[in-house]
Image (cartoon, grey):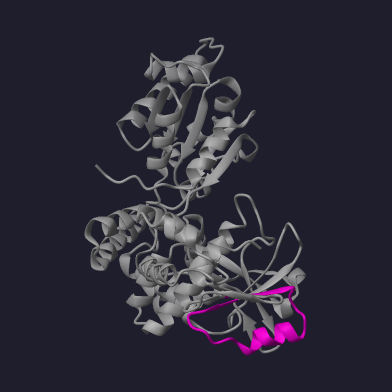
Amino acid sequence: MQKYLKRKVYDQLISWKNRPGKSTLEISGARQVGKTYIVNKFADEHYKQKIYINLLDFSGELFLEKYTELKNEIKRGLFSENPVYELIRRQYPDFTDSSDTIVIIDEIQESSDIYNRVREFTRNLKSDFIITGSYLGRILNKEFKYSAGDLDTIQIQTLNFEEFLSAMDKLSLYEKLQIFGDGEEAVYRELENLYHTYLSIGGYPAVVLDYLETNSLDTCRNTLKKIIRLFTNESKRYFEDILDDAVYDNLFSSVARILVKEKKGFEKDSFSEELQSLVVKDYSSNISKASVNRAIDWLYSSGIIGFAGKIPNCNIMDFKAKTRCYFMDVGLTNYFLTQIGCTEGDIAGISNENFVFLDLKSRMSHSRELALETPAFATLGNGEIDFYTKTIRTQKTYAIEVKAGKKNSKTIQDVVTKKKADYILFAKGNTHGGVVDSIYTIPIYGIGKFRF
């Protein structure tokens, strides 16, 4: 029996179920992050009746046929007091419309007709509804209408470090961790080793399960490669003009190469233009800049990359969007940096920074803690600060420096001297942490326990 990977998002699903006046729930997230599995587990454990429809398989084909039949009958004069109820009953005669029933429609991108009925699902039935599927498939199809007012949304990511530790039955170690020192040496040492494993394999559920079964990093990399290939093959449906394998290998590699560049922003005005210049340079004869720009939007919308902003001179009101990007899984970061031939030192430094980016980004969505649209780095004079943020609760600013070792940067010292931030946060490897005045130092793997 496959091991169950406990996910924090499960609690969000329960909160949604218990919320009065809720709407249809849209579950978003990249491919292979476990959306279908967690939704079905939740439904099986919290409802008396579950109806699962996958628009990509036979159940979906039959459902769409019933929809077409009913629509044509209504056009010919059939009166139906509740067409949505009638539609579900035609395929599922034992359907009971009650709060103890949930209807899950997976791969919703396969039918704009069904997606555009979300409002009727919510308003005309007592049952709960969840839809999942590819966001990309909808934004590229003009037949899909936006129903934001009738949708609650939850985003599922790959396993974070705490969820990874839970899968490894090591969560008790994390609970013992003292991020400001005074903890047990053995706890720091073991968590640091587990953290390095996590950076190597990332948090895709299939990859984590492979590691639990085989303890082999090579097996995990092969599984991750399969996930990337599945993702690329699916996308060929939407980008026939550019989706040959060579172009996409170049696209992913170019993202990785941009991550390696140690500079403030780019030669171009945005990340998109910088990436375009790299990809188009190699494929100028058969790929347009417009196609690369759409592909970048695709990478973002599909949950493969996330954008970071820029805050010039630590002025948070001068926020500039999309000036840097990171992969949305540290396993992807490690994989592609290795593919392009990065040194171990570069891989470690960039992976650490990507890890902190993902933690900050998670604090800007559910139960929002931090301001700004995305995590952002900052500049001060000729120097750069890895991340700079402001809290919602206290309105205090933090300059965050990510280091693999113990060395501090001169720029951070300038931030302290010039009082450009209320607090300094060092997220480091090889430390037990500590607090001196307004300067916090924590082990990087413990950043999830830090409260801004």
Q: Is residue 313 above or below residue 222?
A: below
Residue at 60%, 75% in the rendered image: 434
* Residue placed most toward the observer, 115 or 227: 227
Number of disc labels = 0
413 and 307: which one is in front? 413
Q: Measured along the vertical axis of the image, is residue 444 above or below residue 264?
A: above
Quarter containing the C terminus:
bottom right
The answer to whether 119 appears left or right of 115 in the picture is right
| Residue at the (55%, 20%) spot, across then down | 125
Q: Kindly tell me whether residue 138 is visible in this rendering.
A: yes
The residues colored magenta run: 401-426
Please state the horizontal and vertical placement of residue 239, each as a whole percent of the image: 41, 57
**Above-or-below relation of 160 to 257:** above
Percent x, y of residue 122: 58, 27
The residue lying toward the viewer, choosing from 344 and 256, is: 344
* Residue in the picture at 40% in, 75% down: 283
Image position, residue 160 (x, y; %): 46, 58
Q: Position of residue 350 (x, y in %)?
A: 47, 76
Taking the magenta stretch, the answer to whether it contains residue 383 is no
The correct choice, above or below, for 180 with respect to 262 in the image is: above
The image quadrant that residue 317 belongs to is bottom right
Residue 385: name its quadrant. bottom right
Q: Quadrant of the N terminus?
A: top left
Is residue 352 found left or right of 389 in the rendered image? Answer: left
- 51 vs 80, left or right, is left
Q: Residue at x 59, y 39 (%)?
A: 152
Question: Does any portion of residue 143 appear in the rendered image?
Answer: no
Residue 418 painted magenta: yes
